[in-house]
Image (spheres, rainbow, N blue to C red):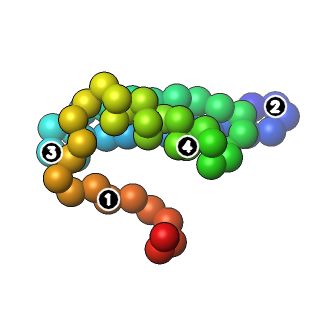
Amino acid sequence: MANGYMYLIAIIDLYSRYVLVWLVSNTMDATWCSQVLRQALENYPAPEIFNRAGGPD
């Protein structure tokens, strides 16, 4: 990118190595990240084990 950054988020099933959902944005905010996660959970069953980066809630 000539000016600024582009961010890619991908929700991946590590067992099958299949990308469930991906989205690109020019800003990285919590709303955008939550939107992608919600989209994945709407289209695929919730996993038994869910790993994520970040601090404790």
Sequence-wise, the earlier of marks 1 and 2 is 2
Q: Residue 11: x, y in percent?
A: 37, 40
Circle 4 sits on which residue? 33
Could you tell me which residue is drawn at 32 percent across and 59 percent down?
51
Could you tell me which residue is drawn at 61 percent across and 38 percent down?
32
Check the image and name the residue furthest to the bottom. 56
Sequence-wise, the earlier of marks 2 and 3 is 2
Q: Secondary structure at mark 3?
A: loop
Q: Secondary structure at mark 2?
A: loop
Amino acid at circle 1: Asn
Q: Is residue 30 left or right of residue 44?
A: right
* C-alpha gap between disc 3 and disc 4: 22 Å
Circle 1 sits on which residue? 51
Circle 3 sits on which residue? 15
Circle 2 sits on which residue? 2
Could you tell me which residue is drawn at 28 percent across and 55 percent down?
50
Amino acid at circle 4: Cys
Quadrant in which residue 7 is drawn: top right
Of tags 2 and 3, the one toward the viewer is 3
Q: Residues within 10 Å of mark 3 (few under 14, many from 20)?
A: few
Q: Residues within 10 Å of mark 2 (few under 14, many from 20)?
A: few
Q: Residues within 10 Å of mark 4 (few under 14, many from 20)?
A: some
Of tags 2 and 4, the one toward the viewer is 4
Quadrant in which residue 44 is drawn: top left
